[in-house]
Amino acid sequence: MILYAGYDEGQEVHDIEIYTARLDGSHRRKLTDNESMDGFPNWSPDAK
């Protein structure tokens, strides 16, 4: 599983959200959805 910041096609570049996905890019899941820039995601030590 990977954790990353990015934006969907059609979104403004400054509207960065946080996503997870499998290493092959499948099962992409958006974790945030707001008008702020959500950058620099990181896993918590207890994986929550």
Image: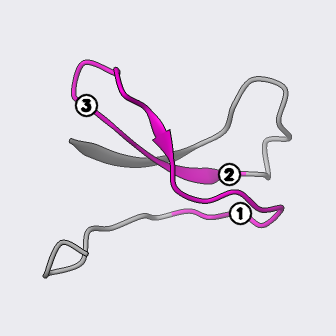
Label 1 SS: loop
Identify residue for label 2. 16
User: In the figure, is residue 7 to the left or right of 22?
Assistant: right
Does label 3 or label 2 sit earlier along the sequence?
2
Residue 7 vs residue 46, the one in the foreground: 46
Assess whether mark 1 and mark 2 are in contact (beta carbons under 8 angstroms): yes
Residue 3 is one of the magenta-drawn residues? no
Q: Residue at x 60, y 59 (%)?
A: 32
Question: Disc 2 to disc 1, how far (Cα)?
Answer: 5 Å
Identify residue for label 3. 22
| Label 3 packing within 10 angstroms: few (<14), some (14-19), many (20+) | few
Q: Residue at x 27, y 43 (%)?
A: 2
Q: Against 23, is 31 above or below?
A: below
Residue 48 is drawn in which quadrant?
A: bottom left
**Amino acid at circle 2:** Ile
Boundaries of the magenta span:
16-39
Percent position of residue 38, x then y? 62, 64
Q: Which mark is residue 37?
A: 1
| Label 2 packing within 10 angstroms: few (<14), some (14-19), many (20+) | many
- In the rendered view, how is the structure colored? one colour
Question: Disc 3 to disc 1, how far (Cα)?
Answer: 23 Å
Does label 2 or label 1 sit earlier along the sequence?
2
